[in-house]
Amino acid sequence: MNASWTTSAPARPALPAPDTEAVRARDRRHVWHTWTPLAADRSALTLSHGSGHHVWDIDGRAYLDASALNSTCGYAHPHVLRALAEQASRLHHFDLSVAGHEPAGLLAERLAGHLPPGMDKTLFVNSGSEGFDAAVMMAVSYWAHLGRPRSRLVTFARSYHGATLLSRSLSTLPRSTHLLDPPVPVTRVELPLEPALLRREEALPVLLAAFERAIGDDPDDLPAAVVVEPFLNVGGAVVLPPGFLRELRALCDATGTLLVLDEVFTAYGRCGAMFAARREDVTPDVLVSSKGLSGGYVPIAAVTVGQHVHDTFGRDPVIGGLRYGHTTSGHAVACAAALATLDVLEKEDLPGRAERLGSGLLGELAPLTGAGGVVDVRGLGLILVVETASPELATRVLTRARERGLLLRQVGAAVMAVPPLVIDDEGAAALAAGLTEAVTDVAG
């Protein structure tokens, strides 16, 4: 392992040594890994434990983790662990369709405090996919409640909103295709420019024109909602031009169309602000958030809506309210973990740290652009992207980085670094050095 990683990783905590081959064999026999070719062996990297921004595998090797999409407070954060244990010992959960519990109320109130006035009502579910399904149901129901039905959605063709039938039906990404009929009509906007150009200010009018055409001006065929991610994650690690959300809000206002923001990935500091919408002072009608909310400690997602959307559900013809939810929606332990995560976010100003460290890392990685098969270097907060000339080259970079003790993510031809938001200056420097070395080793 390269010395630069060894010096940045703390000493491995003493743990009993497992029978590593038995652990891997069990995984190969019984675990069906998500989003993985059957020929791939995910047990080759089997993790044991973590601390801060590092993880250890069952062989005792340490890695700087820049691959965890939902890691806010890092691993084994004492404040989050205490909150989990205390809530589990008091009341692990109770069905919110029957009664309330304090953690859900406290968390909903806390989220309202971080969002614009009027966004005061939050539905809690278990995942971003569930949250997005709920958001679309809310948007279509809103228009039905007003007596002016609309069901069409407008989104990016390369969007990724989840793994359910509804969310997969919006995307043209090959891994999102399915064999069932789509449940709603969708108008998809193709990227008018390559990602390396789309992130620039001069790309804004071109992208807005594409959405204006997709929304249209036929009063009998206006969409129920425009639904977008502020950063296209699975769709190519695409940074959108500055001002896009603000101008898209204006387009939606001009036609009375709802704006649904999918901040499952970008929310809770990852983008350099608590929410990407706050970077441009935009108020969506519906906002979906998930990954960073509890830092990955317990599954939870939030769907927060404007009061004008919420209040129409009193007109629902069946129950006069929201016909959506799950037995574990707003799980009490998950809410406690989320509250503790927000404590850390606020106390340590993790959004500000993400903006500062992300900006510095972009500066350090920028010289890679144009050399050795690197097409572009871009980012948003603590989302760092090195786009290579091919998926094969990106895979080789990931493999080399892992050999050096750095875990990264791959999206097509793009290599992404998404470290825990608690990463310190030393860890950020190690990340920049390791990614640069991996790219240089592979691409020259």
Image (cartoon, rainbow, N blue to C red):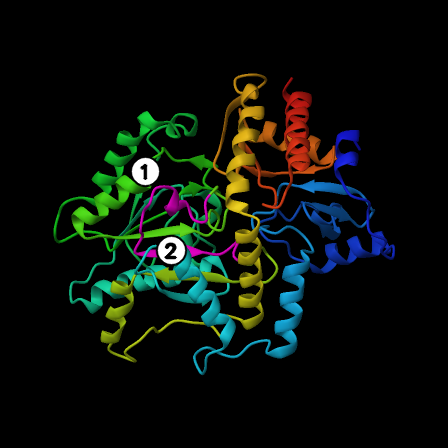
Labelled disc at residue 244: 1
Q: Where is residue 243 in the image (x, y as percent from the top left)?
A: 32, 36
Task: Tell me where residue 110 sits by quadrant.
Answer: bottom left
Give the amino acid type for the residue marked by disc 1 in the picture.
Phe
Q: What stretch is highlighted in magenta?
A: 273-293
Q: Residue furthest bottom?
A: 98
Q: Which of 442 and 179 is in front in this view?
A: 442
Task: Tell me where residue 317 sits by quadrant.
Answer: bottom left
Q: Is residue 102 above or below residue 178?
A: below
Give the amino acid type for the residue marked by disc 2 in the picture.
Leu
Please name the residue that numbered disc 2 is placed on: 115
280 within the magenta span: yes
Q: Position of residue 44 (x, y in %)?
A: 75, 45
- Estimate the spatial distance between the alpha carbons at disc 1 and disc 2, rounded to whole Å: 19 Å
Left or right, 83 with reference to 321: right
Badge 1 density bin: few <14, some 14–19, many ≥20, Cα 10 Å: some
Tell me the SS state at disc 1: helix
Q: Can residue 413 be seen in this view?
A: no
Q: Nearer the viewer, residue 110 or 329?
A: 110
For the point 39% across and 47% down, the residue is 171
Q: Residue furthest front?
A: 347
Foreground mark, 1 or 2, reads 2
Q: Where is residue 294 in the image (x, y as percent from the top left)?
A: 56, 59
Q: Nearer the viewer, residue 54 or 400?
A: 54
Q: Is residue 84 above or below residue 27?
A: below
For the point 34% across and 27% down, the residue is 201
Badge 2 density bin: few <14, some 14–19, many ≥20, Cα 10 Å: many
Q: Where is residue 236 in the image (x, y as percent from the top left)?
A: 47, 37
Left or right, 389 with reference to 20: left
**Quarter the N terminus occupies:** top right
**Quarter the C terminus occupies:** top right
